[in-house]
Image (cartoon, rainbow, N blue to C red):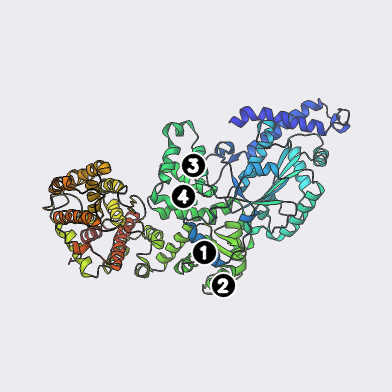
Amino acid sequence: MLFERIIIPAATLTLASIFSRVVCDGGGKFFSWVKEKDEDPQQLIERASEQYVQNYAARHGILKVLGMREPVPLESVYTAVQFLDRDGISRFESIEDLEKAFRQQGDRSFQPKHSKKLDGLKVANEKQYLMVLGGPGAGKSTFLRKMGLEALKGKAGGYTHECIPVLIELKNFAAPEIELEKSIAQEFRICGFPSPDLVTQKLLEQGQLLILLDGLDEVPTKNVDNAIRQIQNFVDQHDKNRFIASCRIAAYRHNFRRFTDVAMADFSRDQIEQFIKNWFYSDADREAGTAEKCWRLLQKPENRCARELAQSPLLLTLLCLVYHSSQNFPQNRSVLYRKALRVLLEEWAAEKRIFQEEVYQGLSTEYEEVLLSEIAYQGFEANRLFFSQREVVDQIKTFLANNLNAPRHLNGEKVLEAIAVQQGILVERAQEVFSFSHLTLQEYLTAQYIDDQHLIPQLVTDHLTQERWQEVFLLVAGLMRGGADSLLLAMEAQAKTLIDTPKLRALLNWADEVTDDSRDTLSPATKRVTALFLAVVNDYALSLAHVLHPELSRKLNLALTLANTRIPGFTSSQDKTPARAAIPTRALAIALTQSLATRAFGKELNDALTQTFTSELARFNIFKNIHFEVLIARLKEIKEQAPDIRQPASVLQAFHNRIFQIWFNTLKLDPAWTNLSGEELSKLERYLYANWLLVRCKQAAVRVSPKTWIAIEERMLKVNYS
């Protein structure tokens, strides 16, 4: 490793220099207790210093988590962290204010979008006493270890203070007494330093140590108060030294007087990308472009919730391990989210040895998962992401009381404390206000509850067209290991209830008639949605076309993209969740009109539309007895008659009407069927969205009967069927 080849020699010299100064008297001579050794004191110190650096690098310079087969060098994967200042930690907003702020933010992160972020290394250099707070797997321990490595490097590192790092894992103090000075001396003793107790005393007196206190929250609960008192006394007694401590936010009591509190910020987009590039650092990965492929895959719309998990270093590590094993992410997203939940519930907790706490005796992972799924569902059903502490405790108590096999010794307060402090699945966002650590986890647990309690009919009836429930639908489909046929059939039946006006039925009947028996291998649903798209151009139709036939939708989107430059307010969202804003009907006809009427910009758009209609749609053979080449020919005939755009509005409108007539005549479409009311347009959009979600659920499902799906697709976007 680079650290071993280059840094160890330099770090050894730095440490030896510090130790030599400490154990010399004012005249530069070694103290007598050093000279008692048989060998040269300087050589002894240099050898012990080298051993200390090697020990630190071996113990704290590698990462091996989540069942990794091989450790990875911390230096190779470390990504510079950022902190939130105190304003980002101590927030006392009400539940209502938190709900409002989350929804106004417009993304899925619970971290305020405009929170001030501070460079981690810079803060560590500026603050003599630093308390690093964060949730499980946020990177606190990794940061402390990295600061130790930087201090070891001396002038070659980023830590600007010349001192010797000593990392103390507080979880190792099972006894009430936390004897920090003895623990530091033991680190020097095992490396062969002469008179380690006296050396430690001198180093502390002269302020030559960077003391890294990792995991205050991992001290056994019964010892916490005593541990805090002893650490405070130690810091006060040796206040010339530098200290960095870490603790989970939910366990912190804000009672370290000298310390500046900062919290680990979620990974940003750039940090996630850098972490992935660092993770896949081997020559083989670089040659294969593994990091770039993993990053591109994570950017796909269907992986947006996985990107949310990636804001945590621990769960981003999980994503990298999953990708490494298969060069892909699971097509069934529920598999990935279940693994993430298990990491927090089980694997990470086991590595941190928190199951020794009394509260976990009898609280199995499966039992806890059922409890969490009930809390998640009740909140999500009520459209709430934040809960008061009293609410959660009451839910836990009710759950325990109503379950015959629940451990009798448990109480709601202790269970909530364990879930929030040790596992971080529930997080205290403000004083006595909690939420799930990731919205993705709440959605997954909600889906799990629906599947466990057989609530699919209620889910479909109440929430089919509510986009907030989109991820839950997809996860339910992935959880139904016996087959998702019942879900898909229920969604189809519910969607059909939206087509309940004469115009909407006429529009769907028209789409069926003009595409029925056309000569092509495209599915009937694909052909019908293409017809609907041309009649009532909007993003919902385009999105449905995309999930049914991506290539065809890209061709249609080309015309839309260019039309966007011609029509105010015109938008396109291929590969995105359907947008809320409706595109005006007759939009393509308007685009054609402006293409003809605005000569300066007309050619590019006209060519694209001509290509789309005469070549691409003709190639797919979607329509029966509709000839788009005739449409283009007629438009070209009247092109020379296009009025100047400076003509009166009545002249321009008359020309527009001629274009509309040609357009609707070509499509054999009654213009009245597209003249929808606001309510009808809303129903059509919700209908198209429901069908889009139906296709997505089919894709997300573990198992679907081919017979069931063929029948559904045959009936899709069709009013009259037996």
User: What is the CA distance from the residue labelled 3 to the residue labelled 4?
Assistant: 11 Å
User: What is the CA distance from the residue labelled 3 to the residue labelled 1?
Assistant: 29 Å
Element carrying mark 4 = helix
Query: Of the numbered discs in the image, which one, if any, rests on residue 394?
Result: 2
Q: Label 1: few (<14), some or many (≥20) within 10 Å?
A: some
Q: Is residue 525 visible?
A: no
Res. 346 image quadrant:
bottom right
User: What is the CA distance from the residue labelled 1 to the residue labelled 4?
Assistant: 22 Å
Residue that label 1 marks: 99
Q: Amino acid at mark 3?
A: Glu
Of the image marks 3 and 1, the number of the one nearer the N terminus: 1
Front residue of this view, candidates 555 and 38: 555
Of the image marks 4 and 2, the number of the one nearer the N terminus: 4
Element carrying mark 3 = helix
Front residue of this view, candidates 430 and 633: 633
Q: Is residue 256 above or below residue 298?
A: below
Residue pictured at 38% horizontal, 53% vertical: 332
Residue that label 3 marks: 273
